Image (cartoon, rainbow, N blue to C red):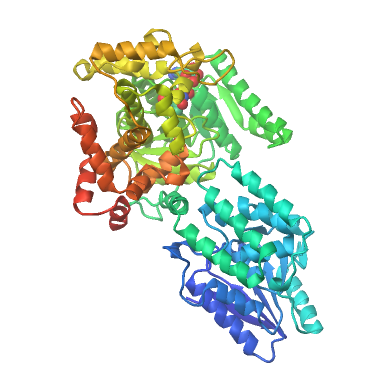
């Protein structure tokens, strides 16, 4: 397919890039563009060239599916097209609208001038994939926008409107009209003046404070907490510094060496994995792309507590009217007041206007009557986590809601099929598991019941996009993907304390691995009584499988976590800092004694191996059972719902990085400890992949 359209307008050749959706600069487009430029340069009747894209995109940049290892080497490479443009003996003007990012901006920097639409979005966001702009961007952008601005744009990966750069030398014109006509005019003016045409590479960096600016940036980056982007940020800085310290050609060589090094870095591999993983979640095997989507114009939310309020806000933020139903006037008033207060707080920080607050609140209809849900296209239940309460809610909804309405539960653990069975329309029932705070957290687990129809599933996937969430499909089981895995992770952490680690050692080891908060501090924050209540219920239903739990001893001595001033740690009033507490250590000591455990030395490495190993093992079981569709979906859940450190790419990606054989060897070692066999039993998927010398990502590719 032709990816470039060529036309002449009198003496100007206009080359339109057209490779949907965003003119990514993969080989087909580079090749066609190179040929079109050569054709114009060879045509004596052409005096100047304009290179442009579509309204939506000049170009979104490199085709990252070409990123395997080092930079794509099939000619013409991006650098060759840029070189062809820059050294042309006819003037070339880039006409930019829509997005002009990464390689797209680097391409435009190869032109002799640029004309942009005011709304065009400009940036070099490569750092967000753990790399740097490797097509000369770090060498050319500073020559046009100045060192300081370029450093900020490149090290932070900022994307800005063209209008904000109109005071720089980047654009000859920033216009609010037809950019191609404006670019043709600029191209003719350049042609009239005659050669030589200004090449960005020839512009001197005249920045008297260069060293001070570089030092300031170096200092800022040294304090950066973003471990996923840190290495790339530092390399971006060093590459940009080349514009000050090196001649252009040497600067380019250095840029290339730095990007090739980054391409091989574990951080960049992880960030690129995340990029693809977040795109792969939308592909649901067995669901046709043309599955009809139901219209969702009004949503009902039941329960105005922590979750219901946040879910309602997610809808209101996207302009979707919500009917919010509560059991009592008091709970309803409280819930609505919290929503309003949240909006007012956001407005006071300048993130939304007072008018936005009014508009959103006007879309909200509070009610005590389930009958008010009769016109809702989707109802999400967020009442107490109790099967009987939820069943009675679903019974009422079935009687009241119109035909075709989707009935969803926000349950964290309960069986969606059981809920669906209480209705006459199980195909319209599914789980929509939001994460707290629901208006902020990006993750949405969409729990597909046995009978959930493809239409209902697709409609909810599309709604998730509309409200800015990343949706991952999960099957029915206790805790779905995320909570089922986190239970194992937390239990592994508790097990380490029983064996001899201090709570602070467990937390610090996992924080050093990259979690912003270790599991025990997290337990204190969430409240230890939540797990306690679950375990009590579990003990009542399956007494033979119950075992003594160390956190129960803490709760039974009134240590509920931060809210009671003590848990695994103690807390000063009004202060969230976790302070190691000899009283907690004494409770732990007595627990060990009661169980006959002699404490042993635990290494930090072991803490990570056990806690992350528990996640990986449970993740593999979840895959075997078909609860998650692919390993990368589990990573998306963990990165967006449980703050898994991005530099490791998610638990399943990390398993591949350290090697499944190592994971298996660890699990087998833990398994051989007395009493640990069933808990640490390696998932058969891990065993079989190790036998076949395959990684999880190979397994995923083979099944795609
Ligand atoms: P919550 O206790 O803050 O709110 C529940 C609300 O439901 C209360 O305001 C209550 O008055 C109302 N309610 C109870 N029965 C009702 C009925 N029959 N009709 C109308 N309203 C009724 O609870 P939270 O934390 O919001 O949890 C709600 C659901 O969301 C639970 O199923 C929970 O497992 C799930 N969930 C909770 C998360 C969390 O972090 N809190 C995260 C994800 C899911």
Q: Image quarter for residue 509?
A: top left
Q: Position of residue 657 (x, y in %)?
A: 35, 49
Depth check: 652 or 607 in front? 607
Report if residue 154 is visible in the image: yes
Can residue 434 be seen at all in this image of the molecule?
A: no
Tally the marks: 0
Q: Nearer the viewer, residue 341 or 326?
A: 341
Q: Residue at x 69, y 69 (%)?
A: 95
Quadrant of residue 558 in the image?
top left
Relative to 114, 673 lies left or right: left
Please identify the quadrant where the C terminus is shown: bottom left
Q: As drawn, is 545 to the left or to the right of 521?
A: left
Question: In x, y percent, where is residue 388?
Answer: 34, 19
- Kindly identify the residue that appears in the image at 38 percent across and 26 percent down: 394
Question: In the picture shown, does residue 358 fall above or below 26?
Answer: above
407, above or below 87, in the image: above
Looking at the image, residue 118 lies above or below residue 199: above
């Amino acid at each position: 397919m032709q990816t470039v359209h060529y036309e002449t307008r009198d003496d100007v050749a206009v080359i339109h890039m057209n490779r949907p959706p965003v003119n990514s600069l993969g080989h087909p487009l580079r090749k066609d563009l190179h040929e079109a430029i050569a054709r114009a340069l060879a045509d004596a009747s052409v005096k100047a060239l304009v290179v442009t894209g579509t309204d939506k995109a000049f170009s979104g940049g490199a085709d990252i599916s070409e990123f395997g290892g080092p930079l794509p080497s099939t000619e013409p490479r991006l650098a060759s097209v840029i070189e062809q443009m820059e050294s042309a003996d006819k003037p070339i003007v880039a006409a930019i609208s829509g997005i002009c990012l990464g390689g797209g901006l680097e391409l435009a920097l190869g032109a002799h001038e640029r004309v942009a639409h005011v709304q065009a979005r400009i940036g070099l966001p490569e750092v967000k994939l753990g790399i740097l702009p490797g097509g000369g961007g770090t060498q050319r952008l500073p020559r046009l926008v100045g060192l300081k601005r370029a450093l900020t744009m490149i090290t932070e990966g900022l994307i800005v409107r063209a209008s904000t750069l109109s005071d720089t030398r980047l654009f000859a014109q920033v216009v609010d009209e037809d950019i191609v006509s404006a670019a043709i005019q600029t191209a003719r003016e350049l042609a009239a003046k005659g050669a030589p045409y200004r090449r960005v590479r020839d512009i001197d960096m005249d920045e008297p404070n260069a060293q001070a600016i570089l030092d300031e940036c170096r200092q800022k980056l040294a304090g950066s907490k973003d471990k996923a982007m840190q290495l790339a940020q530092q390399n971006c800085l060093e590459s940009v510094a080349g514009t000050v310290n090196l001649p252009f050609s040497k600067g380019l060589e250095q840029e290339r060496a730095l990007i090739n090094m980054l391409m091989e870095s574990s951080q960049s591999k992880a960030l690129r994995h995340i990029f693809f993983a977040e795109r792969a979640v939308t592909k649901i095997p067995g669901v046709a792309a043309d599955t009809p989507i139901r219209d969702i114009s009004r949503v009902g939310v039941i329960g105005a507590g922590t979750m219901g309020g946040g879910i309602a806000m997610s809808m209101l933020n996207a302009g979707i009217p919500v009917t919010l139903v509560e059991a009592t006037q008091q709970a309803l008033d409280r819930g609505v007041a919290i929503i309003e207060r949240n909006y007012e707080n956001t407005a006071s920080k300048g993130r939304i206007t007072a008018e936005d607050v009014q508009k959103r609140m006007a879309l909200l209809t509070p009610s005590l009557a389930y009958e008010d849900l009769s016109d809702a296209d989707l109802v999400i239940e967020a009442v107490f986590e109790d099967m009987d309460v939820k069943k009675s809610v679903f019974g009422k909804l079935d009687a009241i809601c119109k035909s075709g309405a989707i009935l969803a539960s926000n349950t964290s653990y309960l069986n969606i099929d059981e809920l669906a069975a209480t209705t006459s329309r199980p195909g319209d029932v599914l789980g929509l598991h939001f994460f707290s705070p629901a208006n902020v957290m990006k993750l949405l687990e969409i729990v597909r019941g046995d009978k959930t129809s493809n239409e209902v599933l697709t409609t909810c996937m599309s709604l998730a996009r509309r409200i800015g969430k990343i949706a991952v499909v999960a099957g029915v089981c206790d805790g779905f993907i995320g909570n089922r895995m986190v239970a194992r992770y937390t239990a592994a952490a508790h097990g380490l304390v029983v064996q001899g680690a201090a709570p602070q050692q467990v937390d610090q080891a996992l924080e050093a691995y990259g979690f912003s908060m270790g599991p025990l501090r997290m337990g204190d924050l969430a409240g230890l009584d939540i797990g306690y209540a679950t375990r009590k219920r579990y003990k009542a239903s399956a007494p033979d499988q119950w075992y003594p739990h160390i956190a129960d001893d803490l709760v039974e001595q009134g240590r509920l976590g931060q809210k009671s001033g003590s848990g695994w740690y103690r807390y000063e009033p009004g202060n969230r800092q976790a302070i190691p507490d000899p009283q907690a250590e004494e409770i732990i000591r007595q627990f060990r004694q009661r169980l006959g455990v002699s404490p042993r030395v635990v290494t930090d490495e072991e803490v990570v191996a056990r806690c992350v190993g528990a996640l990986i093992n449970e993740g593999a079981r979840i895959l075997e059972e078909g609860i998650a569709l692919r390993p990368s979906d589990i990573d998306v859940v963990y990165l967006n719902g449980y703050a898994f450190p991005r530099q490791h790419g998610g638990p399943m990606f990390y398993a591949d990085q350290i090697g499944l054989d190592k994971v298996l060897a660890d699990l087998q070692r833990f398994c051989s400890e007395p009493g640990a066999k069933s808990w640490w039993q390696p998932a058969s998927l891990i065993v079989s992949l190790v036998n076949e010398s395959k990684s999880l990502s190979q397994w995923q590719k083979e099944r795609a």
